[in-house]
Image: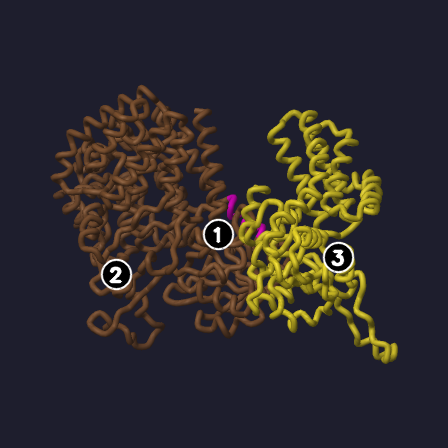
Amino acid sequence: MADIQAKKNEFAWVKDKLTQWLKEDPEMAFAMGAIRALTEVVKASKAETMMGLQIELEAASRVLGTVHTSLSLKSGAELFLRYVTRAYLDIPDFNQCKSKLIERGEQLRTKTTSSRKQIAFLAEPFIRDGMVLLVHGFSRVVCSVLIAAAAKEKRFTVYVTESRPEPNGHRTVETLLKHNLPVTLISDSTVGAIMDKVDMVLVGAEAVVENGGIINKVGTYQIGIVAKALGKPVYVAAESFKMIRLFPLRQRDIPNRKAAFEPAQPTGVTQEQLQNLSVESPDLDFTPPHYITLLFSDLGVLTPSAVSDELIKLYG
Amino acid sequence: MSSWKSGSRLSGSNLSGSYDDDVKLMERVLDSRQGGSKGGSGLNQPFTALKFGGGGNSDDDLTIESGAAGVAAAEKRNIRRSSGSSGLPPLAPNSTPSSAPVSIPNASSSSGAASVASSAGASPGAAASPPAASPGASGQKLKQTQKPQQQQQSQKGAKQEKQQGKAGEKSADVASSPSDNAGDKQQTKRKQSVSGPAAQAAAKGAGAANSAAASNSLKGSKPTQYDDPKQLQKAQKKQILALELSTKQVPLFAHLPQYERPKVSITERLMATAATNQASLQANLHPKIIRLGLKYVSRQLQGSNARTIGMLKAFKHFIRDHENVSGKTMAIDLDLKLRPVIQFLIDCRPLAIGMGNAIKYLKRQIGATTTMEDNEAKQFLISEIDRYIQERIVYADEAICATTADQIQDGDLILTYASSHVVEASFKRAKAAGKNFQVIVVDSRPRFEGKTLLERLTAAGIQCSYVLLNAVSYIMKGVDKVIMGAHAMLSNGQVYSRCGTAVVSMVAAAQNIPVLICCETYKFADRVQVDAISQNELDDPDSLCSSDGGEDKLAGWKSNDSLKLLNLVYDLTPMEFVSMVISEVGLIPPTSVPVVIREYQLRTQEQIQQDRAFY
């Protein structure tokens, strides 16, 4: 423990590198950035034993956690560390193992685009001609699915929620408009009103949890409940590295972050009266698995219960 | 027989039929026998051959370290040790030592198996083991016709074994032995034919046969339907201890056995059964086993973990004291000798699902000892049993406690039902970690298990409330989590637990309160049930009668035609009501129970391979 704490200072350069990469390539998934950074750590490592290397990687991943609180960053790091442990069990020779890790890390880098391609390939048949979709938040995976479907010359309309307070929905709208897709922008509260017109809901995920539920932009849970009440399927498009070993039972069990922006405060009140005002603006919410119909991931099209199966296979 | 009759006139022997008295009597007799060879004329050979390890203080062997403190206390209260022998005759009936191997008929499946063997050639497989099948028929006539065939088979088997010495074939033997308690000839045949091709695959590699056999052994055997007179007869012929069947049963549950509280002592019933059943007569039960059985009947040993550990420890004694005089390998002999033991335990009280899994594991390990010397095999099996207890129960409980304690947050109001040892330990651990929480204990008649839990939790300084099951919907509001234990987890994600668990889960789910079930993986059953009726346990309906003081309104229920009492022990909680299962592999949704079973099976294959390579 103390070792890890001490070592953290050594890895400030990791932080800088990651920030730089994220700036250069905004399309890069956070998890991939984490894996790339950790691969660099392995390359630069002077450790002689696996134990030493693992301590360094632990310290580095903690430093990375401070760059961005994205859950997928954490899950990517966890995934790589898990792979390290596994690889060492298979390849007891340290130097051989180290080079294998570097090789694998490089391989995983290219996985981002390939994951998204795979997901788009799997999800696109679910979008049929004349369908009405509802999307929430800004997810690059979801956008790639829609773009792939459009490329197949399917005609469909997309309702995009604003996803306030940022509002993230506007980024989705921009991306889709750039690919000439017809979109309808609605405010978050209109979801209930238009749900009966919708054929399916498609969302991304920040993280996919142990029981197959997802942690995503706040508002996803609401949409899930309304969709279930009206019998509409909810599909989630998420890469496999977003699956994390977390098992939240209720909303308060998720590592919650405050949104980047808060709802606007009322203007017609005095300072003193403002004392009574408190603002809650969570960034994420948790959608339990029974509101989710299917998950599209690079491992295939999964039911929520299959997520745990994959996690058990991966993490033992 | 005569020696036994004299035994029944012993001073202090109590014929009132109370369980406590039975156990006291047993203890005195067992301890006296352990003291020395002063057993009188009735001692039969197998018993003199037994070496009583551990001396007189062997009760501590059965004390469960994993903390069933109440059980240990009960033991201390009810069991008095007597020193010295009193010349009492042994309790098990006389029998000829060598008859055991032949007494279990192989029925027609042996001939089927023989043909498979000859066709398979190099892989003796399923055929090699004469006792390989089971309990299908048990008539005397059949036995005699099978005898010569048996002996032939056993010789052939022994020869082949010596030639091959492969452990792979044993697995096929092991595979068919779990059909022990099924009693259906057809079933046995089917199993044999299934393990036949499996055995043929053994020629390709021990692993293949083993996996097929292991998967066979993990398939549930068909339980006896007690309302079918034919099946009932068959089952009764097999019984080592025949308790009196209840005369008044609820028709819906007539397929399950319900026994009257015995009017004579259990040991007398054991003798009575021996008079009619060959199997019982030749059982030669180890005293530890008899003692264990009595504890089951009298409910002194309660709770899946306690019962399983008790059973495994008794098996250790049994294995240690077992002398292989049969001329076959230890594996075959032990497998054969274990059957009456297991049958006896079942007759005392139906096996817990975890116990069944432990037995399957033990049989698999017995199958792995074919190439070992007798003593080596014994050592191996004893250490394997120890390992099972340590890994699958003790350490698993540790892991579960740690995880559950983490789930408990400051300020939580937690609800629990009845009494689960691992849930209790988790609460104590969370308390020790300084968490501030309160517990509501929900309890129910007739067992009132929650009372002991309440006592222990309050002793640990945890703030508790206590309600009966009828108040659960009232008390549920404001509860943060419901944490309960389980008897078993079924493959379709349902929870098989103490009767009342389903109600508590349903009420919690209706109010969106998460339900956490703590269950060790050794209790994960590779079977599916959709209701609590097809398989269950019926307890004594008379316990529903008593009330605290006042007039017992149900006293005359037996003579009342319109009234039947039902005392169910377990119920089934649907998967939808359960949020999370906490086991030693971590937190899993109930849908992942079959995944864990599958992964464990795969791991065990590897382990068995490794063990084989080692030995």
In this rendering, position of residue B515 left or right of residue B336: right
A219 in relation to A302, above or below: below
Q: Which residues are magenta?
A: B395-403
Badge 1 amino acid = Cys
Which dot marks residue B519?
Answer: 1
Image chain in yellow: A
Crowding at dot 2, Cα within 10 Å, few <14 / some 14-19 / many 20+, comes out as: some
Is the residue at mark 3 from the same chain as the one at mark 1? no
| Res A107 seen here | yes
Badge 3 amino acid = Asn
Chain label for disc 2: B
* Most distant residue in the front direction: A153
Q: Position of residue A169 (x, y in %)?
A: 75, 62
A11 in relation to B206, above or below: below
Q: Which residue is mark 3?
A: A180
Query: Taken as a whole, is the magenta stretch helix, strand or loop?
Result: helix
* The quadrant where residue B263 appears: bottom left
Chain B takes which shade in the image? brown
CA–CA distance between discs 3 and 1? 54 Å
Crowding at dot 3, Cα within 10 Å, few <14 / some 14-19 / many 20+, comes out as: few
Viewer-side label of 1, 2: 2
Q: Quadrant of the N terminus of chain A?
A: top right
In this rendering, position of residue B360 left or right of residue A41: left
Q: Which residue is mark 2?
A: B254
* Most distant residue in the right direction: A271
Residue drawn at x 42%, y 64% as measured from the top left? B500
Badge 2 amino acid = Ala
Helix, strand or loop under label 2: loop
Chain label for disc 1: B
